[in-house]
Image: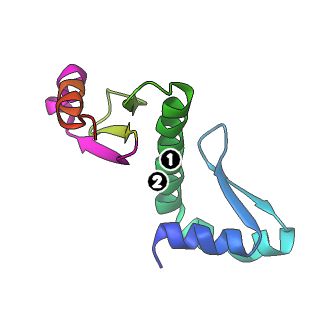
Amino acid sequence: MNTAELIEQATAEGVTLALSPSGTIKATGDQTAVNKWLPTIRDNKTGILCELHRERRHAKVVAMLEAAPGTRYAVHVADASTDPVVVAVGIRKIATFELEIPHQYYDGFTLLELIEKHSGDR
């Protein structure tokens, strides 16, 4: 079972996994179900955190597109100093995706030019 499936299964059993304000995993729901899932959550902590951060970035670009109906794309970079730089991109009516760009090659302006060039009206 991959991490997304693990989160889906936990949700189906009444456990909601979310990022806490401090960046850790917050498990809520029926306490019996939460207690049952805690060992699995601990064993898969790194993957769960990665997936929850990915979901948050995805939601961010979708919200950006919804807030600006006239825009064709939205780009979100939480921290351009990381290596790799994680870039979430949403292109209206086409796709949302993420890129991991090695820090030494990351150039935000070049990235925007490429997105603009290749996301033409469809």
Report which residue position mark 2 lands on: 50
Does residue 33 appear left or right of residue 88 in this picture?
A: right
Question: Residue sitting at 37 percent across and 30 percent down?
Answer: 72
Residue 4 at what x, y percent from top left? 50, 66
Q: Where 81 falls versus 2 (above or below)?
A: above
Q: Dot 2, crowdedness within 10 Å: few (<14), some or many (≥20)?
A: few
The three-letter amino acid code for the residue at tag 2 is: Cys
Q: Quadrant of residue 106?
A: top left
Q: Quadrant of residue 86?
A: top left
Disc 1 on helix, strand or loop?
helix
Question: Residue sitting at 48 percent across and 79 percent down?
Answer: 1
Does residue 95 appear left or right of residue 3 in this picture?
A: left
The three-letter amino acid code for the residue at tag 1 is: His
Report which residue position mark 1 lands on: 53
- Image mark count: 2
The residue nearer to you, when weighing 4 against 61, is 61
Query: Is residue 38 visible in this depiction of the protein?
Result: no
Point out the image quarter for the C terminus. Answer: top left
Query: Is residue 14 visible in this depiction of the protein?
Result: yes
Question: Residue sitting at 45 percent across and 24 percent down?
Answer: 70
**Residue most extreme to the right:** 31
Residue 12 at what x, y percent from top left? 70, 74
Q: Where 35 falls versus 45 (above or below)?
A: below
Q: Which residues are magenta?
A: 93-111
Question: Residue sitting at 55 percent across and 35 percent down?
Answer: 63
Tell me whether circle 1 and circle 2 mark residues in contact (CB < 8 Å): yes
Q: Dot 1, crowdedness within 10 Å: few (<14), some or many (≥20)?
A: some
